[in-house]
Image (cartoon, grey):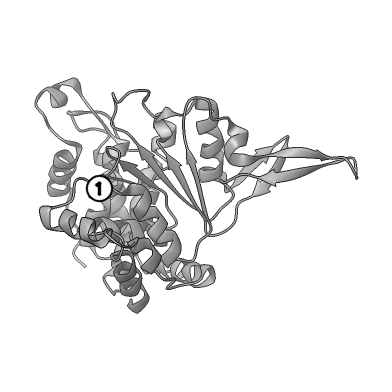
Amino acid sequence: MDKVNEIITEIKKAVSGKDQQLAWILSVILARGHILLEDIPGVGKTNMVLAFSRALGLGYGRVQFTPDVLPSDITGYSMLQRDTGTMEFKPGPLLSNLFLADELNRATSRTQSALLEAMEEGQVTVDGVSHKLPQPFIVFATQNPTGAAGTQLLPDSQIDRFMIRLTIGYPSLEAEMEMVKARLTTNPLDDVRQIVSKEELIALQDQVRDQFISDEIILYIVRLVKSTRTYSMLSAGASPRAALAVTALAKAVSFINDRDYVIPRDAELAFLHAVPHRIRLTPEAESKDVTETAILKELIKRVPSPKI
């Protein structure tokens, strides 16, 4: 837990007033998941990702997606070596520990599918040859709100690969003033120091994976996820992958809260954060301004919680 607190404290040097978002992002990283950041440009998403890469000692890659970005622009390509007559693989920015896919919903489906393979299988395929990604491997993807110029909806298959979707939002008055003052003479990112090595981060991820979770709580998670598939105001419920994501995230929540076992509240918090982007509202729900989170809170009330 000391390391977790140190990491958050260090990142806060460059990110003001977003403590809850930072804790959830670190939880996803410890659970070996990927993060989708949905927000307008200019609220500090890239700055926050850079702070995480520095505090965690991770190699960083970034691509600003536009419709003309090709799969090889992110995965890399093979180049003929004249002296040997052989093809040599030149890795792209995707082959890094922490990859920022900026404005992902402006990319073409071909380029998105290359990223999908990396997120799902931990490898990229170039000219029929598979290349393993370095570990740890985390994707931060940002998308502009739907309807912004040049954007398109991400397919459900891609959305489902992200463990969590977060909105950073505008800072408070105090946080924005603090941010402006901090950048008058220096860049706060320069003050962010490395807290853990890659090997130490993997060890923390292993500890999270080994957190104890009882069969009763696993059943509770499955029932919560299953309840989304029959709720009248949802046209599409959460997939079985959602149950895996909620379970992994619940373990990370328990770890960050300094326990070595999962309690029902951990599962509920994970459910509220890992599922909203995996469900679809009916037109009736949209017309009544019902939110995904409100529905999930209602389902938590309906599904009996185990007594641990």
Residues 150 and 110: in front is 150
Q: Position of residue 171 (x, y in %)?
A: 18, 51
Is residue 67 left or right of 7 when viewed as pictured?
Answer: right
Q: Position of residue 106 (x, y in %)?
A: 42, 28
Is residue 77 left or right of 61 when viewed as pictured?
Answer: right
Q: Examine the rendering and report whether any part of residue 261 can be seen.
A: no
Q: Examine the rendering and report whether any part of residue 165 can be seen.
A: yes
Q: Position of residue 123 (x, y in %)?
A: 61, 46
Which quadrant, please, contains the N terminus?
Answer: bottom left
Residues 258 and 5: in front is 5
Residue at x 90%, y 44% (from the top left corner) = 83
Question: In the image, is residue 17 above or below residue 100?
Answer: below
Residue at x 18%, y 54% (from the top left corner) = 176
Residue at x 33%, y 78% (from the top left corner) = 2
Which quadrant, please, contains the C terminus?
Answer: bottom left
Is residue 83 left or right of 73 when viewed as pictured?
Answer: right
Q: Position of residue 303 (x, y in %)?
A: 18, 48
Question: In the image, is residue 296 above or below residue 190?
Answer: above
Estimate how packed mark 1 is, as few (under 14), some (14 to 19) or many (20 or more) residues with alpha carbons within 10 Å: some
Q: Residue furthest front?
A: 185
Question: In the image, is residue 130 above or below residue 281?
Answer: below
At label 1, the amino acid type is: Ile
Residues 121 and 139: in front is 139
Residues 43 and 214: in front is 43
SS state under label 1: loop
Read off the residue under disc 1.
168
**Quarter assignment of residue 290:** top left
Q: Residue furthest left?
A: 288
